[in-house]
Amino acid sequence: MKFFEPIEKASTLLNRVGALIAVALIIYMFGHIILEIVMRLFGRSTFILDEYIGYAVATMAFLGLPYVLEKGGLIRVSLLMERIPEPRRWPLELFSSLVTAGCFLWLSTFWLQNVQRSYQRGVVSETLAETPIWLPEGAILIGMWLISLTLLVRSLKIILLRSRYSSPTA
């Protein structure tokens, strides 16, 4: 169990950093929208509101998701879980965590290729800002890796807690 604690602490720290970035992005979006409203009162615009708010929403969702999962804040379908006695829920929890982690890791391999391709080809947005597309794509990729790590840590925790409860010394 001692080998697990540093892994869990690292995951928790990374999730908190992701959550802080997500909160900062919410504040940024609020500020940018207010700025755009004020500028439009004077017949001006930043011309990048839609683009940057879109990037911020996607980044916020992917970076905030691991923290929400860790804190148990995701919506769960409890119809099945409520009918299963608590000591017997762990196989379903483990299965769902591993399958979901596997899906995110599998998707992230393709997303990584996309980020690399965008970077190598110098792909930019088709707006006045000409934002390098690998930047928002890379932020989403980091979020995918964080959610995968969180799910794997969660799976390991389920296994360790299961073995602790099933051992005769516990």
Image: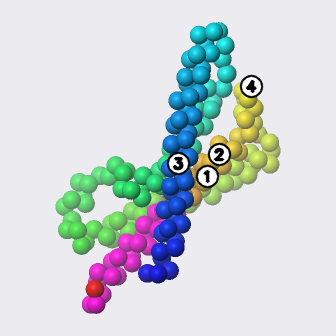
Task: Pinpoint residue 58: horizontal percent, then vertical percent.
Answer: 55, 41
Q: CA distance from mark 2 to mark 3?
A: 19 Å
Mark 2–mark 1 distance (CA, rounded to whole Å): 6 Å
The outermost residue toward the bottom is: 169
Q: Residue at x 63, y 9 (%)?
A: 42
Q: Are marks 2 and 1 in contact (CB under 8 Å)?
A: yes
Report the residue marked by disc 3.
20
User: Which image quadrant for residue 33?
Assistant: top right
- Total marks drawn? 4
Q: Secondary structure at mark 1?
A: helix
Viewer-nearest of discs 3 and 1: 3
Q: Residues within 10 Å of mark 4 (few under 14, many from 20)?
A: few
Q: CA distance from mark 3 to mark 1?
A: 17 Å
Tell me the distance, in whole angstroms, between the alpha carbons under discs 4 and 1.
25 Å
Say which amino acid is labelled 2. Glu
Residue, disc 2? 137
The answer to which of marks 2 and 3 sits earlier in the sequence is 3
Q: In the picture provided, is 32 more to the left or to the right than 72?
A: right
Q: Earlier in the sequence, mark 3 or mark 1?
A: 3
Q: Residue at x 66, y 54 (%)?
A: 112
- Rounded to the nearest angstrom, the CA distance separating label 3 from label 4 is 29 Å
Left/right of residue 75 with respect to residue 153 in the rendered view: left
Q: Position of residue 142 (x, y in %)?
A: 60, 54
Tell me whether circle 4 and circle 1 mark residues in contact (CB < 8 Å). no
Q: Earlier in the sequence, mark 4 or mark 1?
A: 4
Q: Position of residue 125 (x, y in %)?
A: 72, 33
| Quarter of the image where the N terminus is located | bottom left
Return the disc, 4 or 2, that comes first in the chain's sequence: 4
> Which of the numbered marks, if any, corresponds to residue 128?
4
Query: Label 1 sits on what residue type?
Result: Leu
- Disc sitting over residue 141 in the figure: 1
Residue drawn where x is 80% and y is 44% of the image? 121
